[in-house]
Amino acid sequence: MEKAVESGQLTGETCGETSENHKRFGSWVTPIPFELPPDEMFGYIPTYNSAPRGPNPPVVSTLNSRPDLVEFAATIKSQFGNMANLPRGLVVEDFIGNTLFGQVYRGKINQQRGSDNVQEANVMVKAWNCHWIELQFHPKPTEPSWRRSARGRFQIEMKLLTTPSPLSPHHNMVKLIGSGLVNGRLAVVYELDPLDTLRNLLPRDDFDWFSRVKVAIQFASLVSDFHSQQLRLRNICADNLVLEKDFHLKFVDFGMLIGGDFGDMPPREKVLGCFGYEDPYFINTGEFLDKSDVFSYGVLLLELVTKRAAFVFEENWFLHVWAREEYEKMRKKAHHRWRKKDCRQLYKKSKSPSVVHESFRGSTLFDANDGAKITKLALRCVCRDPDKRPTIKEAIKYLRQLEVAKMMML
């Protein structure tokens, strides 16, 4: 198994899934229509968008509007008060993208303030996928499978976002303002004016070098705060991060949170995390560490600077494997040039190896040495041996030493 992970050839049989299951994990891949086997829970980034599009907006309703959710709605109301209600005047407008367990949408709240005064606020709505079997035979909160269900993940997120804690004031945490149903699925409403998901923004040229370093530092800061509370995210990936209009980052999915008041990892959970971001150490041992989140963060960092996806299904290709191999090729080539006496002076003037996308070179605020440094940091984060990875606090300190970070006071 370890060799398979290190080589980048992680087959369906190797990770205990069928090759058909692999189709569900890819991102940036060709849409593949399929039906889910009835014995599986949702827990993957869909390869196609099943969310409603076009002129008809998704239907919004309250939790107790469905007969099979009346008892659950009463429990949520008793635990979370007004957060169990939908904001008045909520309209869900258009689909943004997929998260690990559902979809996110842009929305608006229109509130009448007098006869001629309508106040409008932009919001974001996130809806969970619900497996059909959950609606008929949903687990009880005392059962081991509760945390793996849509209801369990919904309740975990409600608890995290309504309980005062040192995480609450963090500027990269979303603010919950209500919950309900979107097209019959459990949903929450965030006080957030979304630009797009990080997944959709990664290939774009207007998402510049400075903004990418800013996002890298912001998210590392948030992960550090979670770790300081003995909490581990487990689902770090570009699909679960949303940026506001000024490229300000918000993390929007907490469905795999473990540690602290949220307990240990659910037994027999099939979902390892976001495909392409999973720590090989965790896959091989079943032990999830703080530095397993660091591994996932390293993959995200590579996505930010290379404009490449974490995993490409058609090629069975992993970004962290490619980056490590590409870096070694560059390093060996540079060393070979150095050994030639007539090239030594040229080598001294050359920059260290970097996997940064060529479109950033020569752009505003980009420094070649920064590119080399951030490459080294990302490769340290995705090191096979967890003991050789930096802590997330060390990664933040390193990133803040970049020239662009010092210049822009990040």
Image: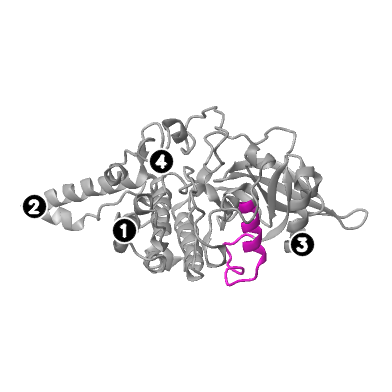
The residues tagged by marks 2 and 3 sit, at their Cα atoms, a distance apart of 72 Å
Q: Which of marks 4 and 2 is nearer the N terminus?
A: 4
Marking on residue 311: 4
Q: Report crowding for label 1: few under 14, some 14 to 19, many 20 or more residues within 10 A (C-alpha).
A: many
Q: Which of marks 2 and 1 is nearer the N terminus?
A: 2
Dot 3: element: helix
Q: Looking at the image, is 199 positioned above or below residue 368?
A: above
Q: Report crowding for label 3: few under 14, some 14 to 19, many 20 or more residues within 10 A (C-alpha).
A: few
Q: Report crowding for label 2: few under 14, some 14 to 19, many 20 or more residues within 10 A (C-alpha).
A: few
Q: Where is residue 154? Give x, y as percent.
A: 64, 53
Going by the numbered disc 1, the residue's amino acid type is Arg
Q: Earlier in the sequence, mark 2 or mark 3?
A: 3
Count of all numbered marks drawn on residues in the image: 4
Q: What stretch is highlighted in magenta?
A: 152-174
The residues tagged by marks 1 and 4 sit, at their Cα atoms, a distance apart of 19 Å
Q: Earlier in the sequence, mark 1 or mark 4?
A: 4
**264 sits to left or right of 60:** left
Determine which residue is flagged by label 2: 339
- Is residue 358 visible in the rendered image? The answer is no
Rendered residue at 42%/58% (across/down): 288
Dot 2: element: helix
Q: Nearer the viewer's eye, disc 4 or disc 2?
A: 4
